[in-house]
Amino acid sequence: MKVLCCVGCSRHPSPSPAWPLPKGPQGKGAPTGAQSSAKPDSQASDDEAVSEVLSHYSSASEGASLAEEGTGSEAVDEQAQEEEAEDKLKEYMDSILDKSAKTRQAALQSLRLAFSSKTLSEFLLERRLTLTDSLEKCLKKGKGEEQALAGTVLTLLCLQMGSGPEGEEVFRSLKPLLVSILTDSTASAIARQSDLVSCLSCLEGIFNTPGVGEGSSVLVQHGPLHCSALQSWSLLLTICPTSHIKSILDNHWLKLPLLLSSNSIALRIVAGETIALVFELAQDVEEDLCHQDTEFLRAQLKVLATESNKYRAKTDRRKQRSIFRDILRFIESGEYQEETIRFGLECMYVDSWARRRTYQAFKEVLGSGIRHHLQNNELLREIFGLGPPLVLDAATLKASKVSRFEKHLYNSAAFKARTKARSRVRDKRADVL
């Protein structure tokens, strides 16, 4: 439902702007949101801004349900609030072309928060070409941080457009530029990392670079880039035709285990998850990967699943052991630990490595807005097979609410069950003796 919260209603006597305003060249605009947006390196500030946006829309959805039963004056206020939010978005789009790099980055950050926390397909449909041109200029003339933000906003714009011709038009118009940034070794590493939307061959050229093994200076410099390339490559792998899957199994299967010896824990984990995904796809196309090299791979996975080297950080060792236990269990017995994602009155089951990779990709882009988009974004619901968005009336929403006491009982039971489950797989000293 695209109805925003009423201005001046009793539930929200003094509503705040829908998104933080970027600070303009004359110093105009709301200071807090823009200042935090101008510092994309601050994760805490970014999370607070996202929470502010989602909090606004959470209350907005409640107000929207009550607005249908309200008076005529509330409908007028509601329209005014919607127009105010659209005006803020127009300001951000204009600020993308500002002469100040900080103002452009603040505007891009605000657009990123807005696009990830709300479905705005109708508003963006008639402005997509103008926004695409502005993003193209940021990608061409901007530096690393600005290019990275522009690439993220472009991704979110394609998600907002959905699977129709409009989204494909936006992507195809900027694909050559994104590929050129990706393959340009002189471009900023963070910009190349954000623009991994090209074909498999380009991505393979990144993570298959010679010398990505232990102690390589290339890996130390571009570790995150290799991770992003491998993640994007595995995501595209989930939608490849069967014929291409067989070709990849023949040409690239033996190269993936080499990445398990990387000195980057993130790359080791991504490589392990990609290997599990390749095993899963091989089963789907009835290809047999059980040969002598597979035995060596299992030995590598067992080492990583029980590693206790003191020169690695304790949290890194725990994270690595947990993930590689799941990978090893799947390769040896075909068992996958199912995960349940709940959003609103619905839930989604992540029951395969392919589905996990797809969900993680959208979660990385949308952040805490992933649940809102799973409820309302038609493209995401089509990808995950959730059907059309549910249309709920005020009575249904009210009946679905759980009392505070019931929430307390549920959380207590969930905590007890989680503690018991973790105690069975928690790292013990006996595991490494």
Image: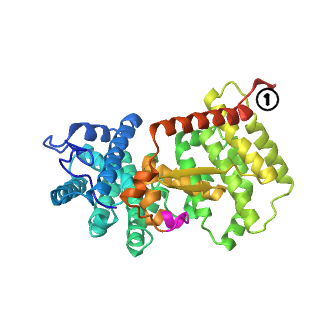
- Magenta-colored stretch includes residue 390: no
Magenta span of residues: 381-387
Amino acid type, callout 1: Asp
Q: Nearer the viewer, residue 301 or 407?
A: 407
Residue beneath the point at 32% across and 56% down: 65
Nearest to the observer: residue 192 or residue 413? 413
Q: Position of residue 383 (x, y in %)?
A: 53, 65
Number of numbered discs overlaid on the protein picture: 1
Which residue position holds label 1?
A: 431
Vertical arrangement, residue 317 with respect to residue 344, above or below:
above
Q: Judge whether residue 382 is colored magenta.
A: yes
| Residue with the most extreme right position | 292
Label 1: how many residues lie within 10 Å, few (<14), some (14-19) or many (20+)? few
Query: Horizontal and vertical percent for residue 68?
Result: 27, 61
For the residue pair 215 and 74, the one nearer the viewer reads as 74
78 lies left or right of 138: left
